[in-house]
Image (tube, grey):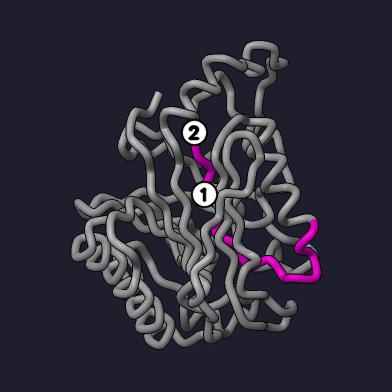
Amino acid sequence: MPTEDLRVALIPHDIILGEINCNLASVEQRLKSLTPAIDIVVLPEMFNTGFTVDSQLLQSIAEDDNGTTIQAIKQWASTYGFSIWGSYCANINGRYFNRGFMIMSDGSANFYNKRHLFQAGGENKIFSPGMEQSPTITIKGWNLRMAICYDIRFPIWNRNVANCYDVLIVPANWAHSRFHAWKHMLMARAIENQIFVAGCNREGHDIYGNYERYDSQVFDHMGMDIAEKDTDGTIYATFNANKFSHDRSKFRPWMDADEFKLIID
């Protein structure tokens, strides 16, 4: 069980399609203005390019794990002393992935490829699905995993077997027209898994719709909204270790859960 509180900041910035340098510069300015003592910063899905399924655009913006974007994130994490999570368009050995990153302040990096591709938006026609669940990353005694946007529609994918993780981080590009589903699925994942859930959406608009400033959401392990909204759109939240440990010890629904086997093919 974690023994220290975890402080999280979500930066739902307005992404300019395909403009990597502009988007990196925008995020860097937001990082400089964060309040002190942040442990984790969460960025939206494809924060550096915007979400796209345009094959020609993807060829020009996709990077590998040592490209401009990941190098910039490592530099930020080292400079400011916190972990940074989000996703970007990756070209890994000639295949495109919607690739989540978890960059630590010491420069170490882990990755997760989005499993569930959004057919309604054509994502499945150009991206490859991930074939592994998110790695579990430990920060200040908290075990964290990632799901990317559409992944949250699939409860079994995020099932917290025997309390193996405590926090689900969700970078997203989720249009406001579907906000009701977004909010309540994040809340449901929190309640059913007895975990904290932080979903960072973007701002602005793209071909899929509009994105409102405060669409990003944070829920505690009881499904309660704990988001602290700043005027610039940044959302902060504190994960209370003592209350979390107490509640999990007192109420243990995971002990009554059904056994299952997840098959990935």
Q: Is residue 194 visible?
A: yes
Amino acid type at mark 1: Ile
Mark 1 → mark 2, Cα distance in angstroms: 10 Å
**As rendered, which of 57 and 178 lies closer to the eye?**
178
At mark 1, the secondary structure is: strand
Give the x, y percent position of residue 19.
46, 87
Amino acid type at mark 2: Asp
- The disc placed on residue 166 is 2
| Residue depicted at x 66% and y 22% | 261
Q: Is residue 53 magenta?
A: no
78 lies left or right of 238: left
Question: How would you rate the neighbour count of disc 1 (Cα within 10 Å): few for under 14, some for 14-19, many for 20 or more?
Answer: many
131 lies left or right of 186: left
Question: How would you rate the neighbour count of disc 2 (Cα within 10 Å): few for under 14, some for 14-19, many for 20 or more?
Answer: many
Q: Is residue 265 visible?
A: no
58 lies left or right of 151: left
**Numbered label tally:** 2
| Residue depicted at x 69% and y 19% | 260
Q: Which residues are magenta?
A: 165-180
Judging by the rendered image, the residue that carries numbered circle 1 is: 169
Give the x, y percent position of residue 200.
55, 61
Marks 1 and 2: CB-CB under 8 Å? no
| Residue depicted at x 74% and y 77% | 208
